[in-house]
Amino acid sequence: MSVTTTTSTTGTGAALAVVQAQNLGLTFPTADGDVVALSDVNLTIEKGDFVSFIGPSGCGKTTFLRTIADLEQPTSGTLRINGQTPENARKDRAYGYVFQAPALYPWRTIEKNVALPLEIMGHSQAQQTERIKRTLDLVNLSGFEKKYPWQLSGGMQQRASIARALAFDADLLLMDEPFGALDEIVRDHLNSELLKLWDRTKKTICFVTHSIPEAVYLSTKIVVMSPRPGRVTDVIESNLPRERPLDIRETPEFLAIAARVRDGLRAGHSYEEVV
Amino acid sequence: MIFRHRILATLGTLSALLAIVTPEVVLADGAAAPAGRLLLLPIIGLVLAGGIGLLTRWTLWQPLVSLVLLFGSALMLPGAVAGFAGAIGGPAYWQSLIAFWLLTWNFAERLSAAIRDGRLPETGTGVIIPITFGLTLLILWEAITRGANVPPVLLPAPSAIGTQLANSAPILWADFVQTFIKSVIPGYVIGCLAGLVVAIAVDRSPFLKAGLLPIGNFMSALPIIGIAPIMVMWFGFDWQSKAAVVVAMTFFPMLVNTVAGLNAASSIERDLMRTYAASYWQTLLKLRLPAAGPFIFNALKINSTLALIGAIVAEFFGTPVVGMGFRISTGVGRLAIDLVWAEIAVAAVAGSAFYGVLALIERGVTFWHPSVRGGRA
């Protein structure tokens, strides 16, 4: 099929784009017929962006993230990561992926779990030691190197899995509802930690969530999605400052963006699905 | 609970006292030895004091008092034999045995209650109950075979088996080396390793998975021991044919378990490896084999008992004049039943030790698994 170029969201030059999707579609064949998980998605993510994908379950936000990671293959359209195909980007170790569950290997200590990608990518022992120390410092887990995952709380486990994704220093971080299973107090804390980390490391982050305050608090760009078929209904650029204390959530600017996100979700008839 | 304890203590003490009183009836047809008479008084005192002690609320010492009581009743058995209570197999003898059983029960109940309530530490005391239980079974076995005059050909007394164990130690050792060291160990190692390697091959190749795995499942349902005579024809009378039977018996459980275990890693754990662009072998070594550990150890433990059974039964079909299976089959023919039992005891100890060592290694290797560390998943 022919690929049309520019749409409303692909304004800037393709050279800067970390992720560029054009007319992207993905259909899963199932026993009861085809399920359209993604339909005609056009999106550009630039270097240093913090992009949140928000929408009810079944809207394809996780599928889109997995397609970027080459864990799913699109059935139509084009997708480029740093100008490469997703497969080549994956083989280049272009991104770190944080799953919904920590997925730490229980037979490895925290430091050995963080060392896992480094072992696979063939880093030297000295490099491994240095990077383990640096990334565990970054997520405030120093002192827990020798613990096993099942000896830590859920929030600490998820922090360890973020450290693991940061260890090999990929510029792109893909996070699939990483704090979904945690309570609100821990989630608030990890959200502000994540913002500081993003500010310090200058990484590009794609973050899937179904919490409106979380999306607005974290992002420079919010992608609102709706289900059946999974599609993008709105892309909201946030004008909040990079420095965001937790009480920014009470300001009028914050509430205005949150209202726009909520409107976008309603326009996509998303609420009918969530009852 | 307390109510049941009291009933047990009362019943036990009463039957012990009854056993001591019974001699008067039995003694009518023969005077008791004076030594036996003298033994009577301290035992009566001991049993009475113990019984009363148990009925008080003096809970801290109850396990100890029960033990003293148990010890007293155990003394009554040889006491009964020594004469104060008449002949072996007399009413007092059986009465003593019943008292002994009740008081052992009483002791075990109170000890486990004390451990449960935290009055005694669990470490160390925990092994006392199974040891008491085992010893009690041995004493009952000994007392019943003697008391009821069971013919030794049917069931020899444990003491007779023990004597035979000590007297024929060199024979038993030679049999152990022939069967366990020469047949079981090599067959087990070859069978388990082959099962593991073939499982990895099956997992890698869809063709093998479709072709070999159904045959493997079919073969594992066969009574492999039936091939023992064929193995003797192929590999000769010595240990090689037995090792071959063991290989055949251990191969399929390892194959089937490992294939299942290699799929034990969750999809999220595999996706993680994929995001690192990890190679097949990296994923196998760093994720799928460790995740399969509990399955592999399960097969190793199942195989440890299968291997011993296989080697012993295979020896029934032809062997040089040494080996545990050979000794058992010829021992039965020569009516040397106590030697057969001694051989069975050696096999039981060797099999348990084999299994125990594997279970210990398992605890060390799969320490992370919820079933070992006793936590949630």
Image (spheres, coloured by chain):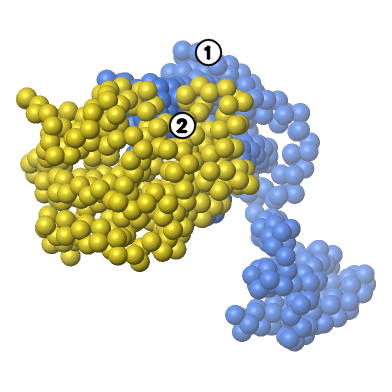
Q: Which mark is residue A169?
A: 2
> Percent from the top left, x then y, of residue B177?
67, 25
Q: Amino acid at mark 1?
A: Gly
**Relative to residue A108, is residue A21 drawn left or right?**
left
**Mark 2: which amino acid?**
Asp
In front: B103, or A8?
Answer: A8
Q: Which chain is blue?
A: B
The disc placed on residue B236 is: 1
How far apart are the two marked residues, 2 and 1, measured between alpha carbons?
Answer: 63 Å
Task: Please determine whether, in this image, residue B171 is positioned above or below residue A49.
Answer: above
Q: On the picture, is B151 further left or further right than B308?
A: right
Is label 2 or label 1 in front?
2
Residue B163, image x, y percentages:
77, 43
- Identify by letter the chain in yellow: A
- Mark linked to residue A245: none
Q: Is residue A162 left or right of residue B8?
A: left
At a point 56% along the width and 52% down the height, the residue shown is: A151
Residue drawn 66% across and 83% down? Answer: B6
Judge whether residue A254 can be spotted in this image.
yes
Secondary structure beneath dot 1 equals: loop
Task: State which chain disc 1 sits on.
Answer: B
* Badges 2 and 1, same chain: no
Report the number of discs. 2
| Quarter assignment of residue B138 | bottom right
What chain letter is assigned to the residue under label 2? A
Give coordinates of residue B331: x percent, y percent: 63, 33
Closer to the camera in the image, B289 or B330: B289
Task: Examine the rendering and report whether any part of residue B370 can be seen.
Answer: no
